[in-house]
Amino acid sequence: MSDCIFCKIAKGEVNTRLLYRDDKVVAFNDTNPQAPTHILVIPIDHYDSVKEMDDELLIGRLFTVAKEVAGKVGLKHYRLVINTGIGAGQSVFHTHLHVLGGRLMSWPPG
Ligand code: 5GP
Ligand code: ZN
């Protein structure tokens, strides 16, 4: 999608340092971190949310990359979050998996 900021990041059209890239997935730091480490893992292809995704390999790849990137930056404890829909706090409508770590987390989330 031409007006989607995460499509632009995935295609290298905006200056964002990528922590990980392969032919399907990229990862980069969140600009408004909610924890000392806050990384976003996204599919390169556009899906408004995880509801629109039916490629199980790609869905699994997001989690595999999240796990690998968390390990690479030294996180032993972390939270993986996918906000889905406005009511759940989704604000960017290109599927993304949050990797949050580096502080104690409470439950339930707000
Ligand atoms: P959501 O609220 O949709 O679950 O998460 C969207 C996330 O994207 C937010 O944490 C927000 O800070 C982050 N974000 C929004 N725009 C940009 C951007 O242009 N670059 C980066 N790196 N993160 C962004
Ligand atoms: Zn997009």
Image (cartoon, rainbow, N blue to C red):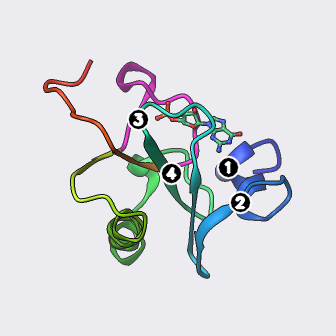
Q: Position of residue 3 (x, y in %)?
A: 80, 42
**Residue type of the residue flagged with mark 4:** Leu
**Residue type of the residue flagged with mark 2:** Arg
- Secondary structure type for disc 1: helix
- Residue 51 in the magenta stretch? The answer is no
What residue is at 42 percent from the left and 24 percent from the top?
89
The magenta segment is: 82-96
Q: Are marks 3 and 4 in contact (CB under 8 Å)?
A: no
Q: Residue lying furthest bottom in this view?
A: 23
Q: Are marks 4 and 1 in contact (CB under 8 Å)?
A: yes
Provide the residue designation for mark 3: 35
Provide the residue designation for mark 4: 40
Taking the image as shown, residue 79 lies to the left or right of residue 82, namely left
What residue is at 42 percent from the left and 30 percent from the top?
85
Provide the residue designation for mark 2: 17
Q: Position of residue 76 (x, y in %)?
A: 23, 59
Q: Earlier in the sequence, mark 3 or mark 4?
A: 3
Residue 6 got which mark?
A: 1
How many labels, in total? Answer: 4
The reply to whether the residue tagged 4 has its Cβ within 8 angstroms of ligand 1 is: yes
**Residue type of the residue flagged with mark 3:** Ala
Which SS does the magenta portion mostly show? loop
Mark in front: 3 vs 4: 3
Task: Name the quadrant containing residue 64.
Answer: bottom left
The reply to whether the residue tagged 1 has its Cβ within 8 angstroms of ligand 2 is: yes
Q: Nearer the viewer, residue 44 or 99?
A: 99
**Residue type of the residue flagged with mark 1:** Phe
Q: Is residue 32 above or below residue 42?
A: above
